[in-house]
Each structure stands twice: as structure tokens, then as C-alpha cells.
Image: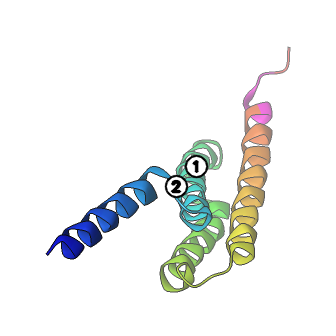
Amino acid sequence: MILIAVAVAALGLWLMLRRKRGPTPRQRMLSELLDAADALESRLRVARAEIAAVAGEDGADPVGEAMREMLRQRLWLRDHGRSASLEQLAEVRESIDVARRRIEQQLSRIERARTPIT
């Protein structure tokens, strides 16, 4: 009986200490990756609205392909995120960062085009 109580106490202490250590590198990477994906998706929505304001609703949708790529990445994460290596997760994160930089460049060009020349 005492042995069981000691084992339960030890297990409880181990679980408590494990929780205090914080997220694992994989959990942290997945969380950062999903945050980056959310931020890019939000920025893509802004870009779509800005482009529509300049070019009109009937024009080409250059943001559409980026949105589809974001969906593909989210589906890949859903299907493979738990088993993916940290390197694979880092590659997905880098592709999100590259896409975000491209969108930021496009939005800067739109902003410059909208600024009146004085």
C-alpha cells in the first residue's frame, strides 16, 4: 500500500515537472508555423482587397494562387505535421516567410502606385 502511494506521488511529481518545462521544440515549431500561416493568410486577404481596390474586382486574382498554396500547406501540416522532422517543418516555415515577403513587396508597389506624384 505504501509502495503504491509512493509510486503515485512520484508519477504526480514527474508529470508536474514535465508540464513546467514548457513546450517541446516540435510543439514550439508547430505553434510558430501555424502563427506564421495565420499571419500570412491575414496579409493575403488585405492584399486581395488592396489589389481589387486598384484593379477592380474583374481583374486577375494574383493572390488566389498564394491562398491555394497556403491551403495546401495547412493540409500537409494536418496530414504530416505530427510525423514531420523539424527540418521539414522549418522548410514549410521558410516557404511561408518567403511568400509573406513577396506579398509585402507587392503591397509596397501598390502603395507607391497609389501615392500621387507631387
Identify whether 49 is placed above or below 114: below
Q: Give the quadrant of residue 37.
A: bottom right
Q: Is residue 113 magenta?
A: yes
Q: Is residue 46 above or below residue 72?
A: above
Picture quadrant where residue 28 is located: bottom right
Name of the residue lying farthest toward the front: 2
Label 2 environment density (alpha carbons within 10 Å; few <14, some 14–19, many ≥20): some
Q: Which residues are magenta?
A: 112-116
Looking at the image, residue 27 lies above or below residue 116: below
Q: Is residue 39 left or right of residue 19?
A: right
Report the predominant secondary structure element of the magenta stretch: helix
Q: Quadrant of the N terminus?
A: bottom left
The residue that mark 1 highlights is: 52
Location of residue 60 by image quarter: bottom right
Residue 15 percent across, percent down from the top left: 36, 62
Screen quadrant of the C terminus = top right
Front disc: 1 or 2: 2
The residue sitting at 76% across, 25% down in the picture is 115
What element does badge 1 sit on? helix
Amino acid at circle 1: Ala
For image coordinates 27% across by 62% down, the residue present is 9
| Type of amino acid at the residue the image marks with label 2 | Asp
